[in-house]
Amino acid sequence: MLGVTLCAALGGSATVGAATSAKPPMIRAAFYFGNASPLNFWSSDMSGAPAAFAQMQADGFNAVEFVVPWGEFQEGVSPVRYNPAAFKSLSSLVSVAKAAHLQVILRLSYGVAIDPHNATDAQYQQVFSNPKVYASWLGYISRVHQAVAKYNVVKIEQLSWEDFWTPVAYAQGATTLALRLQLATSTGYRAWLRSHYSLAQVSTQYGTTYTTWSRVPTPAYTSPSFALMFQYDDWALVHRFFIPAAARFPGLNLEARVDIDPIHNGTQVVGSYSHTDTFVLPGTHYIGTYYSPYLGDPSKSKSESADDALTGLQTTLATTTTRAKGRPLFIFEYQIESNSPEVAHNPALPPSQLPAFILGSSSAFEQYTLGYSLWTYRDYNQNPVFNPSFTLGTNGWTVTGSATPVQSPAGSSLTLSAGTSIKQTFPLDYLAGNPGSEVTVSFQASSASASAATINVAVGDAPVRALSVEGGLQTYTLEVPTADVVTGTAKSQITMTSTAPVSLSDVQVYNFTQLGDLYSVDGAPEVAVAPMQTLNQRLAGRS
């Protein structure tokens, strides 16, 4: 049954927050992206799920979490168009998780999707002010609920502030008055402003006299009035998205924003904004949050110690609990390693400090939380290639010649006849933001005949590279200068042409690997596995 409290989902009998002598077992969850990444998971080969879930359970996890991208499950909003393949995969994965005795957590409305049949970025801007797009989003929430309602292992669902940060992000980057005026309408900001403030109050806060609402833009990011944009986004997150979605998907919760945002006056930081309005939600008994070791770290060093990180953990969880008026927390996105470029300037734990941090974190977890969901269970390459193993046939690929999709219990592949070319255009956002000097191109291939085959690979503006494919299935890799791939446009493309019959799978183009320090991209155990297993044992056995 959906809609139960988290305590009941954990197997306890008392309501969360009520006095009880027997504490329920804690949720120990991990996200699952298969052998792919969050970008292309739903179009990837998921044949390894049974083995992966068995490994998770052996490591002491009792739940698995899936991202459920809006743009992937609902590919069109006007008219509404759903993706039956994604819903079929979701049902299949939930069934496999149930067989492995794992609970299921869903991150709904995930804002990252590279499905070429949708327009995710446009949808996330329009959903704030376009009634048709908003109604379509609510329809997506209802449709996912209908798809999983029959499974009694799906008991926890979340939205995240990250996926509804669009108005703030656009307003922060707006440098012209014309763009700020346009954003005031398209983000729904001005409509909200009119319902909460008088024009005179707005004029006072902006320090500018306005005689008509049509002249009110989004606030300048360097102005103290930008606090209004934070306030609007928090209001929209709770009242426009969370409350209506919770009515359609009972049991829903929210990953609130823990970070405190600076308020500027020109180049000076003159205050801060705490998103406390998102920390106490109607109908909820706990609050969702996120954590990475750099949060609350008192050190100034780029390389923090386990003690620094444990101090940060204790401080962050205690402060967040206070802001949530004493409600327990659930860490919906837990990272013990965060090497992404966005946070590269923050303190980080070196691998040598991870075991002590993980083992030392159990007391803070037990004191403040009901559990966690680990973001990076297995390292992944940030690969923007859609349908990389041809699980969906040639969907997303342009084929010139003859190509035959192959499905088997061992996985999926595509057999190319001699002279056949396949091509795909992919978004560059996930390469352009990374500092690597080279882009790695890799794929698995085997010769479908006794003779060797040559696969000619062209990526972006880079010269064509020829690789010889011989014998059984192997991984082939080449490096291409990032400058030849990221050429100033929004998209690039990869073309692969075979001179003889070959079997092809797992096509990747990437220049960033997200690390988690549990299992490598190839599935080999890393430094955090043993201490994480011990942590899970402690959290499972608490009393």
Image (tube, rainbow, N blue to C red):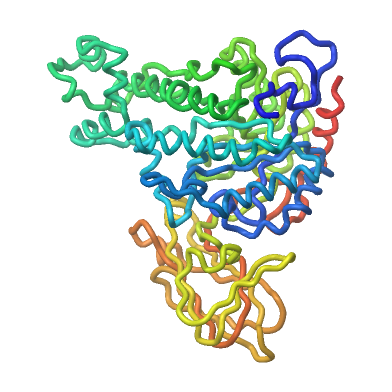
Is residue 265 something one can see in this rendering? no
Q: With respect to residue 523, does 284 lie above or below?
A: above
Residue at 39 percent across and 23 percent down: it is 230
Tell me the quarter of the image containing the N terminus: top right
Quarter occupied by residue 328: top right
Is residue 175 something one can see in this rendering? yes
Percent position (x, y) of residue 470?
67, 84
Residue at 50 percent across and 22 percent down: it is 243
Residue at 44 percent across and 24 percent down: it is 261
Percent position (x, y) of residue 425?
42, 64
In this rendering, would 474 be left or right of 235?
Answer: right
Q: With respect to residue 82, does 372 lie above or below?
A: above
Percent position (x, y) of residue 295?
58, 28
- Seen from the viewer's position, the closer of residues 104 and 372 is 104
In this rendering, would 470 be left or right of 58?
Answer: left
In this rendering, would 540 be left or right of 176?
Answer: right
